[in-house]
Image: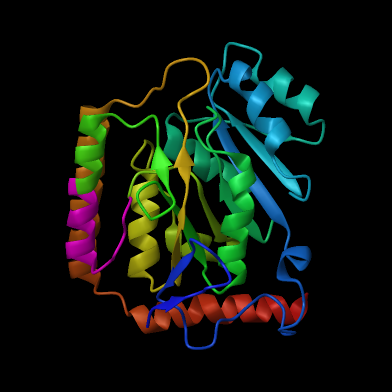
Amino acid sequence: MDTAYDDLPGVQIDLLPREPVLFLDDPDSNWRRQATVSVVIPAVNEAENLHFVLPLVPEWVDEVVLVDGNSVDDTVRVAERIRPDVKVVRQTGRGKGNALAAGFAAAGGDVIVMLDADGSADPAEIQRFIEALDAGAYFAKGSRFAPGGGSQDITAIRRLGNAVLTTLVNVLFRARFSDLCYGLNAFRADCLPYLDVDCDGFEVETLMNIRAVRSGLPVSEVPSFEHARISGTSNLHAVRDGWRVLRTILRERVRMRARVPTRGSERGAVLGASSARGRAA
C-alpha cells in the first residue's frame, strides 16, 4: 500500500506496514528527541571539504563517525578541530562500501545517516530524512530525480547510466526507485542485519537499496539536491563503477532466485525487533 504524507512535503513513503512501528509506544511522543542519530562520513583526503561540511551537521545529531581511508592530508585533524567529539575510525580495507561498513559497525545511534564528505549533499537535509523515518519508513533513500530533487554535478553519461540501472532494479525487484546511486541515505540501526553491507566500492548504495526492498523494509524516497564537489577530485569512475553496479544487481537477483526470501517473515522480524527496542527505551 502506498501512502503520501501531506504534512511532509516531498516525502513519499512506500511499502509501509499497516501500523507503522516506532521505537516508542507512545504515538504522541517526539520520536526524533527519543532516538539517537549517528552520521557516518567516509573520507579520503577531504580536509578542504570538511571545513564546509562538518559545521553544517545539525546540532541535534548525537554522534559523527568519520571513517578515514588512510588520508595523507589533514582530514582527521580538521575533523577533530571542528568537532572535538568526532569518533574517528581508521579504515583497514579499501573503497566506499568497506568504509561505510566500518562506520556502521562503530555507530551507536538508533538511526544511522550516510553523508559524503565532498560537500555534494547539504547536511541540513538530514532532518527531512529523520522526518521520513519518523513517519514510518525504516530506510530513507535520497533521490535527485524525485520531485523537489536535482543535481548540478551529474554528467550526461552518469545520468543515463543511473536511469538504465534504476529501471533494471525496478523491473527485477519490483521496486519503484527514481534514483539508485546517491550517497545521502538514512535508516534505523535495526535494519543493519538485513542490509548486510559486504561490498567494497561505489556499488554500496545500490546493494543497500536492493536488500532493503528484498527484506520488505518500509522504504521512503526523500528528494535531495546534489551540489558540485567543493574541492578535489572524485574517485568515482562512471564506466568502471557502472559495471560494478550492474554486477551487483545481477548477483543479488541470482541470490534472490536461489534463496527466495520470505518478505513477510523478514520484515516482521525487523519490525518486531524495533518494537521490542522501543519498549525497552
Of 122 and 202, the residue lying toward us: 122
Quarter holding the C terminus? bottom right
View extreme (right): residue: 84
Q: Is residue 206 left or right of residue 167?
A: right
| Residue 12 part of the magenta-drawn span | no
Residue 122 visible somewhere in the drawing? yes
Q: Position of residue 117 (x, y in %)?
A: 56, 30
Q: How many numbered badges does the structure rendering display?
A: 0
Q: How is the image coloured?
A: rainbow
Q: Position of residue 109 (x, y in %)?
A: 69, 56
Of 230 and 103, the residue lying toward us: 230
Q: Position of residue 97 (x, y in %)?
A: 43, 40
| Residue 169 part of the magenta-drawn span | yes
Q: Main secondary structure of the magenta part?
A: helix
Residue 79 sits above or below residue 198 on the image = above
Quarter holding the N terminus? bottom left
Q: Is residue 153 left or right of residue 126?
A: left
Residue 108 visible somewhere in the drawing? no
Q: Residue at x 42, y 48 (%)?
A: 149
View extreme (bottom): residue: 18
Q: Residue at x 62, y 60 (%)?
A: 130
Instruction: Examine the image and state in which quarter residue 182 appears.
Output: top left
Q: Residue at x 78, y 45 (%)?
A: 59
Residue 110 sits above or below residue 96 on the image = below
Residue 55 sits above or below residue 12 on the image = above
Residue range in magenta is: 164-179
